[in-house]
Amino acid sequence: MADTLKETRCESQDTVASARSLAASSKQIDADMELPYSHFSAKSRVMIVVITAFTGLISPLASNMYYPSITTIRDDLNTTQSGITWTITAFVIAMAIFPLLWSNLADSIGRKPVYALSMLIFTCGSVGCALSRSLTALIAARVVQSAGSSAVQSAGAGTISDIYPREQRGTALGIYYLGPLLGPCLGPLIGGYIGQDAGWRWVFWVLAILGGVLLLLALFVLPETHRRIVSKTHSIQPVNIPPALSFKDNNPLLDIATVRYPVVALSMFLFAMLFGTYFTNATAQPLAYEGIYGLSQGMSGLCFLSSGVGCILGSTSGGRVTDLLLARHRRALEAAADSERVEDIKIPAEARLGAMWVGISLFMCAVIICGWLIEYELALAGVLVVQFFIGAGMAFTFQSLGGYLIDVFPTRSARITGVQNFWRSLWAAVIVQLFPTMHENIGWGWSYTVMFFLTLAALLLMQVVVFRGERLRQRFGPGPELR
C-alpha cells in the first residue's frame, strides 16, 4: 500500500511538473509572438524593398540594354551574328550559376556585404565591356558583369523574407519582382536611344555609373536584415531564423539537388518554361520591330514600354492577390477549427497558388497570338497590346510561384530563389540559342507555338502541386530539417 501511495504521489508530482512546464512554454510562446517580426519601421522596410528592387533591376537591365545596338557591335568588333550571340548566352549562363554562390554567401555573412561586393564586381565588369576591343574581351567582361549583377536575383528574396511575415510577404515580393521583370523591358528602351545617339560603348558606361550608385547605397544606406544576425542585437520573433551554416552545408550542389522533391521539380519546370518563353520573346522583339516593321533603334526600344507596363500591373496585383488568398484561407480554417490561438492555424503553402492560373493563361494566350501576328506581319498595335498581356501574365505568375517556394523553404529563401534562378536561366540560355534556328526554319508563328506548348505541358504538370502539393511534401519532402 505504501509503495502504491508513493507511486501515486510521484505521478501527481510529474503531472504537476508537466503542467507547469506546458504553462511556461505557452507563456514563452505568447511572449515571443508579442515581439515584432522585424524591428524595422514600416518606412524603413519600404526603403529596403525599393533599394532591393532597384538593385534587382540591374541584372536583366545589363542583360539586354545593348540589344538595339547588337548589329553595330557585331560590325565594330568584326564578328558574326553567331559570335555576337555568345555575349548573350555567356551572360545568361553566368546568371544561372553565380546566384547559387551568392545565396549561400548571403546566408553565411549577411545580405549587406553581398550587395556591396556584387555591385563592385558588376561595376568593374561594365567598365570592361565599355573598353572591349575584341569579341573575346567582351564575352569575358560580360561574364564578370553577370557574376556581379546576379547576386540580388537570390539574395533579394531573402531580404524580403527577413523583414516581412508570411501574410504580408506577397505584396512586398510584388514590388521587389518589379526590378527583375522590368529590366528586359526598360533595357532596350534606354539602350536604344543611348546607342543611337552616343554609341554602344556608352550603354556600358551608363551601367557602370548605375552600378557605382548602387554600391554607395549598399555601403551607406542599406542596413543588414539577415534574421540570425539581427536577432543578436534586437528583440524579434524567433521564427524563420536559419541556423549558422557549416562548410559542409554551404554547398550549392546540395541546393540544386532539391529538385529531387516532386513539388520543387514541378515548380522549377514551370518556372523554366515560363521564363524561357518570356526571355526569348524579349530578345526576339527587336528583330521584329526593326526587321519587319521598319522601326529605328530608339523606336524599337520604346515598344518595350508595353510589356513593362504589363509587368508593373501584374507584379503588384499578383502580390496583393496572393496575400488576400492566404488571409481568406486563414479565416476559413479559423472558422472551421474555432481556434482561439491564431498561431495554431497552419496554412498550406499551396494556398498561394490559387490564382496562378489567371496569370499564366493570360500569358500563354498572348504568346501564341503574338507569334502569329508577327508571322503574318499584321498591325504593330496588335503586337504591342499582346506584349502588355505577356508582361502582366508573366509577372502575376512569377509572383505566385516565387512566393510559394519561399513559403516551402522559409529559412532558406535566398538559397531556393538561387536554385529557381539557376534552372530558369539555364533553360533561357538554351532556348535563346535555339530560337534563331527555329525562326529561320519554321517561322515566327510556329516558334511561338512550340514555346506555348512547352509552357502548357509545365502548367498541366503543376496542377499536381496545386491540388496535391501538401500531401506530396508530407510523403516525399522536403522535411522540416530543410525548411
Image: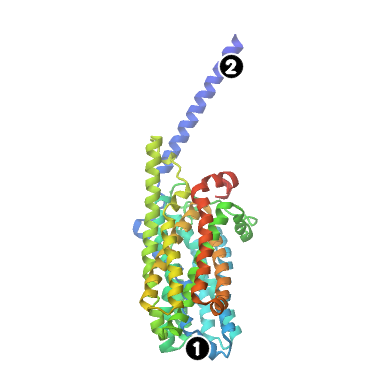
367 above or below 270? Answer: below
Nearer to us in this view, 381 or 181: 381
Residue 52 appears in the rendering: no
Could you tell me residue 236's position as x and y percent? Answer: 43, 49
192 above or below 393? Answer: below
What residue is shown with label 2?
Answer: 7
- Mark 1 burial class by Cα count in 10 Å: few <14, some 14-19, many 20+: some
Whether label 2 touches label 1, CB < 8 Å: no
Residue 336 appears in the rendering: yes
Q: Secondary structure at mark 2?
A: helix
**Of the image marks 2 and 1, the number of the one nearer the N terminus:** 2
Q: Farthest residue toward the left?
A: 43
Nearer to us in this view, 105 or 68: 68
Q: Amino acid at mark 1?
A: Thr
Name the quadrant of the N terminus: top right
Q: Is residue 161 left or right of residue 87?
A: left
179 above or below 462? Answer: below
Nearer to us in this view, 214 or 453: 453
What residue is shown with label 1?
Answer: 72
Q: Quadrant of residue 396?
A: bottom left
Q: Residue at x 44, y 84 (%)?
A: 290
Q: Amino acid at mark 2?
A: Glu
**Distance (Cα) linking label 2 and label 1:** 91 Å
Q: How many marks?
A: 2
Q: Secondary structure at mark 1?
A: helix
Could you tell me residue 392's position as x and y percent? Answer: 39, 65
Q: Is residue 212 left or right of residue 125?
A: left
Which of pointers 2 and 1 indicates the residue nearer the eye?
Answer: 1
